[in-house]
Image (cartoon, helix red, strand yellow):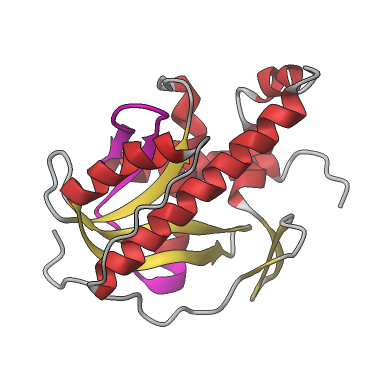
């Protein structure tokens, strides 16, 4: 663990603002592509996704998944902010999406300790920007109360190693941007995937594994800028 416990992020080097159409960010270095766009264009499962999108029900399924993810993220954020403020912890219900929150809440109650930052933008002069979900202290695995970079997801189905590769590299990108913009190095990262029933799926990246994820993202970033682009 770091010897000095953070309560909030230091002042950033500069500000990144997401475009209204969500195609990227305006940063001190100019317009910059978002992490998720870069990962989508360089994903090893891109061909499989493109084939899946040809299904007649693909658009409806995708929209439902986005709505589910947004609702669950909002519940997590409400809970974290109430926890930080010492207020009563909210527990909203939803007929279709409530199971994902019921999956996540017990994990938060057991493992969460302190929020440092929520939904903060990051960027890097190498050509990417984004917004990480949360940074805080939580207990899990081998690092009790470590300063942890977290990403929340939802999934109906179990994810194997291949299916979370992009998410791991996403955390690697956020860690790199966090170091650049705020001068903060997370001790580890957690990918927490809420399920419709039961406990969430947890993927832990140690400090060394997070560095490896950053290196993998850097290679994908270089590849992204060799691809043909419309603009």
Question: Magenta includes 197?
Answer: yes
Please give the name of the residue rendered at 41% of the width and 59% of the height, measured from the top-left corner.
Answer: 77
Residue 116 image point, x, y percent: 30, 68
Above or below, comparing residue 97 to residue 11 in the picture: above
- Identify which residue is drawn at 74% across, 55% down: 23
Residue at (75, 17) in percent of width and height: 51
Left/right of residue 214 with respect to residue 138 in the rendered view: right
| Residue 173 appears in view | no
The magenta stretch spans residue 95: no
| Left or right: 20 in relation to 174 | right
Residue nearest the viewer, comparing 97 with 216: 97
Nearer to us in this view, 174 or 137: 137
| Residue 208 appears anywhere in the view | yes
x and y, in percent, of residue 200 in the image: 33, 33
Quarter of the image that includes the N terminus: bottom left
For the residue pair 9 and 63, the one nearer the viewer reads as 63
Q: Position of residue 213 (x, y in %)?
A: 41, 40
What segment is highlighted magenta in the picture?
Answer: 179-206
Q: How many marks?
A: 0
């Amino acid at each position: 663990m770091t010897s000095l416990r953070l309560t909030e992020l230091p002042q950033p080097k500069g500000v990144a603002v997401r475009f209204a159409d969500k195609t990227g960010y305006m940063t001190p270095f100019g317009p910059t592509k978002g992490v998720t766009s870069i990962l989508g264009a360089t994903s090893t499962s891109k061909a499989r996704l493109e084939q899946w999108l040809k299904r007649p029900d693909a658009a409806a399924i995708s929209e439902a998944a986005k709505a589910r993810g947004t609702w669950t993220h909002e519940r997590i954020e409400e809970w974290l902010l109430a926890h930080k403020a010492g207020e009563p912890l909210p527990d909203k219900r939803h007929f279709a999406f409530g199971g994902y929150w019921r999956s996540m809440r017990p994990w938060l109650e057991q493992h969460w300790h302190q929020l440092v930052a929520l939904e903060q933008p990051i960027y890097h002069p190498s050509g990417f920007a984004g917004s990480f979900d949360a940074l805080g202290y939580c207990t899990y695995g081998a690092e009790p109360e470590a300063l942890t970079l977290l990403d929340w997801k939802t999934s109906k189905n179990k994810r194997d190693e291949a299916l979370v590769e992009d998410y791991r590299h996403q955390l690697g990108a956020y860690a790199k941007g966090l170091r650049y913009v705020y001068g903060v190095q997370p001790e580890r990262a957690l990918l927490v995937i809420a399920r419709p029933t039961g406990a969430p799926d947890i993927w832990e990246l140690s400090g060394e594994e997070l560095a490896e994820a950053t290196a993998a993202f850097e290679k994908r970033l270089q590849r992204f800028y060799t691809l043909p682009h419309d603009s």
